[in-house]
Image (cartoon, grey):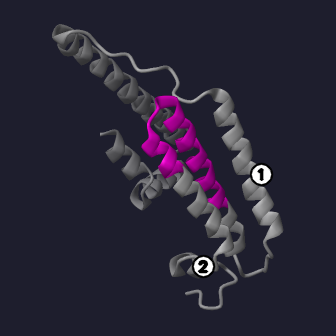
Amino acid sequence: MLGALNAFFLSTAGLTLYIRALLLNRDLAIVGTIGILALFVLIVFGARRVIDRIQRLWISEDGGQSVPLRTQIDWRVSLGVTALWLILALGGMIALPRSASSVDNLLRPMVAATGVATGVLYIALGRSLQIGRFVRVGAIRAALSAALVLLPTGLPASWAASDPGCPGRV
């Protein structure tokens, strides 16, 4: 239900309805927006309470409830990965040559930095949980993402068509 409400209010029809409501009666539209946001919060917290109740009733009868670890990765690793992403993304954007019509050299470092940072997180998670597969997957992901900056790849045609400086823009 939450997904359906989200899909409607972020769709063209939902935004059109909201803009018309704002134009017709601004105060009523704002009150309605607050009500819809409250509905979202109630649905999320209500669903969490229902899930907790089901767990207490059914899972506790079968021998107890397993409690997950509070964190899988140390906060210092998360902070380090965020710093790594910033350094790689900004450094790549500064180092790669730019032109007025090329968004590729701005987006490619961000995508590659995201892949490298996620790979490092996989490696840390694999070491924390002692799962060797995660360490291998993280290393491969980080290496392939780093190669994305060096290889002469371009963005898909749909991204290029949205670029204002692209000569073939529709």
70 with respect to 97 (left or right): left
Q: Secondary structure at mark 1?
A: helix
Q: Earlier in the sequence, mark 1 or mark 2?
A: 1
- Check disc 1 and report the residue beneath it: 87
Badge 2 local density, few (<14 within 10 Å), some, or many (20+)? some
Indicate yes or no whether the magenta region holds residue 121: yes
Query: Residue 168 location, x and y as percent?
Result: 59, 91
Q: Secondary structure at mark 2?
A: loop
Instruction: Please say if 159 is above or below 167.
Output: above
Q: Choose between 16 and 119: the one closer to the eye.
A: 119
Instruction: Give the alpha-carbon distance from disc 1 to disc 2, as whole Å.
Output: 22 Å
- Check disc 2 and report the residue beneath it: 154
Quadrant of residue 160 in the image?
bottom right
Query: Residue 69 location, x and y as percent?
Result: 46, 20
The residue stretch that appears in magenta: 110-138
Indicate yes or no whether the magenta region holds residue 165: no
Instruction: Please say if 17 is above or below 71.
Output: below
Q: Quadrant of the N terminus?
A: top left
Query: Residue 11 location, x and y as percent?
Result: 42, 57
Query: Residue 19 location, x and y as percent?
Result: 51, 54
Q: Quadrant of the C terminus?
A: bottom right
Instruction: Please say if 51 is above or below 31.
Output: above
Q: Choose between 81 and 110: the one closer to the eye.
A: 81
92 with respect to 68 (left or right): right
Give, as a three-letter code, the residue at label 2.
Gly
User: Residue at the location (53% across, 81% down)?
Assistant: 157
User: Residue at the location (17% across, 8% down)?
Assistant: 61
Give, as a three-letter code, the residue at label 1.
Ile
- From where the camera sits, is residue 21 visible? no
Q: Choose between 110 and 164: the one closer to the eye.
A: 110
Instruction: Please say if 42 is above or below 170.
Output: above
